Image (cartoon, helix red, strand yellow):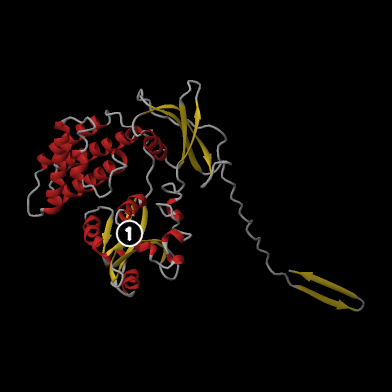
Amino acid sequence: MKTRGEAITEDAEHTLHKLTVLTHQSFTRADLSALIEPFTSRLEYYLKSVVFPTMSRRMGLKDLIDNLSPLGLAAPHVTSLHTLRQLYNKSKHDPDVDLKSQECIRSFEAAVVALRAITTLGITSIDAPQEPSFNTVVCVGFWDHYVGGETEVGLFLPSNHWMGTTPISTFHLHWSSWDHLKPALADHPRYSRGEEALGSTLWKSFSDEGDFLDAGVWEGDVKELLELLSTHNDESLEEAVIPFLARRNNLISGDCPEFCALALTLTGCVKPEQTTTIGPSGKTMSVAKCSQNPSGCYQKASDTCSGSYQVLDSYSKAGGLVADVLPGPVTWYYMTYQCGPTDGRTPTFPFRGQQYTPPPVIQAPAPTYRAPTTTTCNRFGNSVTCNSY
């Protein structure tokens, strides 16, 4: 399985290949932008969620790239990533400025080299296996409540319900946060806004509600959307909501950072656990336990040690959504580690224990059609003759 660092580098290489192939034919500026902008957005998310998972979600791409220097990334590689960022800004925000194909190709060539260099920095989260991503369609609605100075954000899954959607979570933003969130969504390749994106029926349903502000559709990793919204969520406004309507008391949303109804199966709503014991050397050993994705174990070890740690053992097993007592469809990860110097060995999480076998799907036998029968009887004296057909 490829690592997260290898995955983003491979993504950059594929984009570079597409740019090269594009120059073998006639193309437009929009064709170049369609390759540059989505990848650079993915790069920003990679730096936020993998390289710097504990930094502020509000940190922009420029600051994220600058913070690679203290980790040991050479200055030329930092410059290469800034060049890609500037190319993205030109593509996105200066539509009247021409994009030169060779400039784009050179920028991506240098970015590929820089991303390869990042994978050699010994950052545990970068060396972690790349988990498969799931795309989810989420309808997003925004309503202003002027009395409380609040912008309410509603998340909905498309549904066959007569209302057209199923509500799954809400966020409560200070009204001024909309000025920061709106451009962040507008610039994101996974978000489309307006009636055309939502459809006329849902747009009318959303806009007919009082104090309607805007709406759109997100299609991609739902965890990325949640992280984007959670940076603007105002806990004081959420506290003021009528208790049984608050997100933390909603059986669908729960008080988990990712709403459990959907993200429980996509992003892992169960918080990482940890136990400690004294090893044979007299030093403390810790065992981090997490589900769905091993990144929770890495983060738990990083928070505990406030620095480097040595991986002693790791394995994975099958379990359920909230526990691993019995085999189930969810993968649980265990990592034994010790704070202190490390030899750079990363956990492999080999599978142990009983495999999960889904229960068989029992189908009722199809009803056998039996044609109706007709019986005709004739009586002759004391005898009766009947025929059925």
Give the percent coordinates (x, y) of residue 273.
47, 40
| Residue 356 as seen in the image, left or right of residue 13 | right
Q: Quadrant of the C terminus?
A: bottom right
Give the residue at mark 1: 234
Q: Is residue 345 above or below residue 304?
A: above
Outermost residue toward the right in this view: 382
> What's the amino acid at mark 1?
Asp
Q: Nearer the viewer, residue 212 or 236?
A: 236
Decide if residue 28 is in sight here.
Answer: no
Decide if residue 124 is in sight here.
Answer: yes
Dividing the picture into quadrants, the one containing residue 379 is bottom right
Residue occupying the point 39% across, 42% down: 132
Q: How many marks?
A: 1
Give the percent coordinates (x, y) of residue 73.
20, 31
Give the percent coordinates (x, y) of residue 219.
33, 55
Q: Is residue 133 above or below residue 343?
A: below
